[in-house]
Image (cartoon, rainbow, N blue to C red):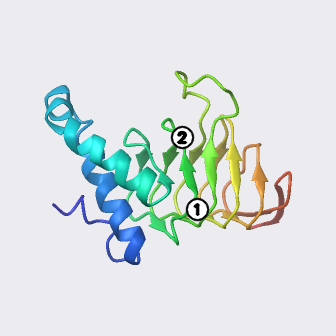
Amino acid sequence: MKSIFQDWIINEQKGKIIMVMYRLANLCTLNKVLFLLGIPYLLFYRFMVEWVLGVEIPWRARIGKELAVHHGQALVVSPGTVIGNNCSVRQSTTIGGKGFDRSNHTGSPIIGNNVHIGSNVCILGPIQIGNNVQIASGSVVIRDIPDNCTVVGNPGRIIYKK
């Protein structure tokens, strides 16, 4: 049960609900039997998280331990996205592919560990964000970002590198 509540301490009210529901939905994808048994829950998850709470975090997205979801409004994550451990995401953020092909999610970002993403950020395309990166509010990231950087602007540019 620890894996379901691994994000509990670092999130506040709405973030706790979103992440516990995501972790349960993600468990349903471990094998075909769990998926078939979990179909009613997956439908409930889609309704509650997407329609009621206004957040799109697909159960197929791979998210590491301790993701902090701040405010959790208008957050969109592509199904093919990979997010590392100890990251945080703020409201009105889009993390996804550039294309319009709904069946192909291979063009989604891979985000490293200890990445903190501000509000109104767009991270688009098959890019990699390194570890220990800060992305300022309002940034549009469309290129790879190395480790230990601070990114600002549209298009996102590195203003600080350790």
**Does 41 sit left or right of 80 as displayed?**
left
User: Where does the image place residue 7, in percent across and percent down from the top left?
Assistant: 35, 67
Disc 1 crowd rating (10 Å Cα; few below 14, some 14-19, many 20+) is many
User: Where does the image place residue 78, in percent across and percent down from the top left?
Assistant: 54, 40
User: Where does the image place residue 136, in percent across and percent down from the top left?
Assistant: 74, 67
**Does 75 sit left or right of 155 as displayed?**
left
Q: Nearer the viewer, residue 34 or 156?
A: 34
**Does 79 sit left or right of 142 as displayed?**
left
Report the quarter where the N terminus lies.
bottom left
Residue drawn at (56%, 25%) of the image: 102
Q: Is residue 39 above or below residue 71?
A: above
**Does 156 sit left or right of 22 as displayed?**
right
- Disc 1 residue type (three-letter): Val
- Disc 2 residue type (three-letter): Ser
Q: Secondary structure at mark 2?
A: loop
Q: Mark 2 — residue?
A: 78
Q: Mark 1 — residue?
A: 115
Residue drawn at (41%, 78%) of the image: 12
Q: Nearer the viewer, residue 131 or 76?
A: 76
Residue drawn at (44%, 51%) of the image: 50
